[in-house]
Image (cartoon, rainbow, N blue to C red):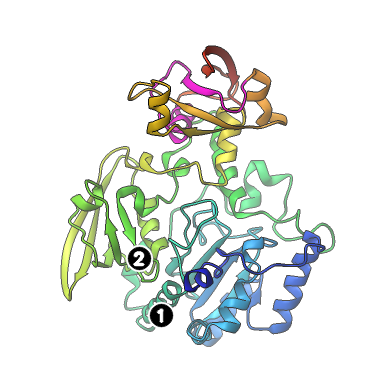
Amino acid sequence: MKRLVSACLLCLFALGVVASAQTRDEKVREDRRKVTEDGFWIYNDLDLAFRRARETGKPILVVLRCIPCEECVKLDDELVDKDPVIRPLLEQFVCARQVSTNGLDLSQFQFDTDQSFAVFMLNADGNVYGRFGTRSHRTEWYGDVSLPGLAKSLQGALDLHANYPENLALLEGKRGGKPEVASPEEYPSLKDKFTDRLNYEGNVAKSCIHCHQIGDAQREYYWSRKRPIPQKVLFPYPHPKSIGLILDPKERATIQSVKEGSLAEASGLRVGDKLTRFGGQPPLSFADVQWVLHQTDEQGGTIPMVVDREGRQLELSLLLPAGWRKSGDLSWRVTSWGLRRMVTGGMVLEAMDDQGRDDLSISDGKMALRVKHVGRYGPHGAAKKAGIQPDDLLISYDGRDDLMTETELFDYAINHRRHGDEVKVLVRRGHRELSMQLPIQP
């Protein structure tokens, strides 16, 4: 029961239900009315939040979350009104809820956009104390975040704020570099569709730029110019488990397990270690560890670490080799739909398990991707138009028969093909082997 309750919190968990009769626009307007009347959260006004922080000397808590996301609908009820640990911590912050990314300063707010919930803890000078919120599965969040973990992150931010600005040097790496554009609506693919604010006088839900649309627009910024998509953009915010590191979601940055033979194990990390410095920064959460990984060069590098091991401070190093990002999984990400449009014509692919490969006598190291779904409309219907059907087995793509996962196929196609090209694909259907041409699309 406790696990179920935890799984209902923080936008990750969906026990709260809004009446199904409400339209999306009605949900957005009702949310604004309720939060504004309550008065605890500053609603969709970051300028006001920064002014309040300068006036009060408090740090700022910014929650970015999608409206009308059903998974997020009970976020503030659960956090503010019901949790006896979280509420007193929140009262020490200037709390702001941002329900769209229209007009968002992308030089200040950088985060994994394949989620509809992200928390920033920062100060009026714009220095980031930490981030909270991560995701490694399309629907399951409870292995990544929890209320106890959030409480410890909030307390960690308050501790850093109490020592500011003496600790400024520790915080410098927590802000990123210059983005491609200043705010989301300036990306070319969004420019003619959105403005820098929500349209409460019209169709407010459709006027919202959702988080995942930033990731889509960022990739298309390169793809539309027939330029390679940088690995940092294609494989953003690597999850710690991609390097064999499992963190305890109930703690700040504590090692729950280390995968045998992994990069994390090679670094000397052990179960129970507490990361007090990661890349020179004090990590407050899963998301802070991801941030440092995200900033590490795609060609590899060394991340210095300081861990607390049973009260002893140890200095360790995490060595990331060239190509390390590619160990991550893209298939769960919302923005993988854009990649499928670009390079698979709308197919959703899944790797055959060992038993399935044995049953079909498929050799080790040879491609065997089952067509789980085929899109039906527009660019996502290109595979269907080419003749591909659900349950076909993709055994070759553009002459490559060694692409073992959907993610590997994405990576190959994005780096070796451009829209306007066509690739030859081979599928097995029953006892027949069929050859088809698939377009690479904008």
Q: Is residue 231 above or below residue 265?
A: above
Q: Is residue 333 magenta?
A: no
Cα distance in 3D space between marks 1 and 2: 17 Å
Picture coordinates of residue 202 (x, y %)?
84, 59
Can you tell which mark lies on residue 248? Answer: 2
* Residue nearest the viewer, comparing 275 with 241: 241
- Residue plotted at (74% across, 82% down): 37
Q: Is residue 279 above or below residue 413?
A: below
Q: Looking at the picture, which amino acid does disc 2 mark?
A: Asp
What residue is disc 1 on? 155
* Residue nearest the viewer, comparing 100 with 329: 329
Q: How many marks?
A: 2
Q: Is residue 66 visible?
A: no
SS of the residue under disc 1: helix
Picture coordinates of residue 340 (x, y %)?
57, 33
Q: Quadrant of residue 13?
A: bottom right
Within 10 Å of disc 1 (Cα), the crowding (few <14, some 14-19, many 20+) is: some
Q: Which residues are magenta?
A: 388-415
